[in-house]
Amino acid sequence: MNLIEAYVYEVTRRLPEKSRNDIALELRSTIEDMLPEQFTEQEVMEVLTNLGDPSLLAASYRDTPMHLIGPKVYDAYIWTLKMIIPWAVFITILVHVVETIVLFSGEESVLSVVIKSFGIIIANIIHVLIQTFFWVTIVFIFIERVGLSKSDLPMTKYGTEWTPEQLKLVLAIPKKKAIPRGEVIFGLIWTAFWVVLYFNADHLAGVYRSIDGAGLQMVMPALNQDVLMSYLPIVLPFAAFEFGLSLFKWKERQWTMRLVAINAFIKVFSLIVFVVIASNLALMNEAMIPYLADVLEINSSSVGNFIEWAKWTIIVTVFVTVAIEIYDSYRKAKAI
Amino acid sequence: MGPLLDTFTTELRRGTLTLAVLSQLRTPQYGYSLVQRLEKAGVAIEQSTLYPLLRRLEKQELLTSSWDTTESRPRKYYVISEYGSEIYEQLKKEWETMTLELKTLLEGDENNESD
């Protein structure tokens, strides 16, 4: 193939089928126009240098954009990704934590299950992130190509062109008042964790012992699941309140006095419910005290004292944590 | 400073390109004859920009084209359409006002400096 034919081919193979022949014909005659009657290879090279890189020439013939996501939709694209990714990560963690706790049979030690879950969760998050990125990108490439927005102006995150009306929806959030998204998501996972723990306490919390060197196994539950479940009508609404509170925090994105009040109310009542449940003597598995006394070779009353002491330590810790959290939220809401 | 100046010059030229091309197409021209005409008038133009531009203007119905196969090699001739002429006249007016405005601006600038 001579140089001219090769050049024409290099340009036209990058173009849509229907315009190829016409452009090839025109390009060939143009190149020949630029050459003298009798030409040398050197002269052909000069002319082709003048026309430049065939891929660039082909690009200027084409109407379709040379990018996947252009400036028109880029902003909306990034915004969508930022919006979806935290939720994708949250749901991934939640599903795995719930699944692990529900399927936990007590045959493996808690520590090894936690370590294994941690690895699986990280792998799943990476997988979900890749999937999310891929599908969101595909959708936006489609929007870019098909041009769902017909105008030349960029699309905003509201899916329309910019108007001054949108300024009314702008919420400038001071850094000192802000509730980080991560905090909200962590709160949701934390609540879910306790709810699942509540329903499965009898095969999660208990006395673990290494039997015949075969790793830790649960020999006896610490709590009476029946007694625990009798508090369901109180516990369930509070779990729902906690979830609702997290969603409200997500929506507000900053601490306001109203949010502080609602938060304090829910936290204080949760604490009361917690203390009421914890101080119910029937909650403890009766068989555990003699068992522990036997194993530890001390008398039952010291075990009882120890449990009582542990219980109050937990209650005081929770109380202090709640107090700090409420004060902190109040301080943030007051910040200017 | 060289490359930056080049970028600005190219930008300035690009805006005037359509006007320059339309002005030369009252009589039918093929690609290379148009290049020659423009070069003779001192308008340097990248050929890789010109040919795609002609096709685009044709698609936008500012130009019409026809193949002449009577000569030794087939040539595609472009000529301005009626619609193209209208656009050209308006564009020319815009250009004239713009140069006038800019001239005032630039001269004003010189006057200020001499003050």
Image: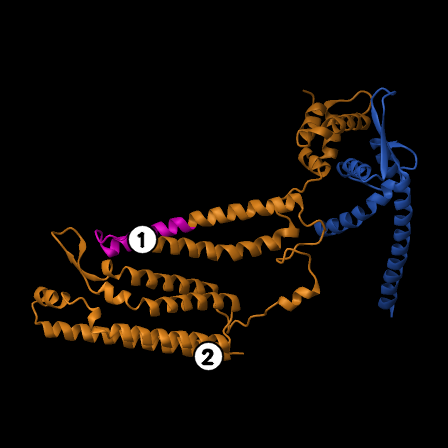
Chain colours: A orange, B blue
- Return the residue at label 2: A331
Label 2 crowd (10 A; few <14 / some 14-19 / many >=20) = some
Residue A281, can we see it? yes
Inspect the magenta stretch and tell me whether residue A70 lies in it.
no
Label 1 crowd (10 A; few <14 / some 14-19 / many >=20) = some
Give the mark toward the camera: 1 or 2.
1
- Residue placed at 91% from the left, 45% from the top? B86
In the rendered structure, the answer to whether residue A278 lies left or right of residue B74 reads left
Residue A260 screen position, x and y as percent? 46, 76
Residue A152 screen position, x and y as percent? 72, 51
- Residue placed at 83% from the left, 32% from the top? B31
On residue A100, the disc is: 1
Chain on which label 2 sits: A
Residue A174 screen position, x and y as percent? 55, 72
Magenta-drawn stretch, dominant element (helix, strand or loop): helix
- Look at the image and give the residue range highlighted in magenta: A101-125
**Amino acid type at image mark 1:** Thr
- Residue placed at 23% from the left, 73% from the top? A280
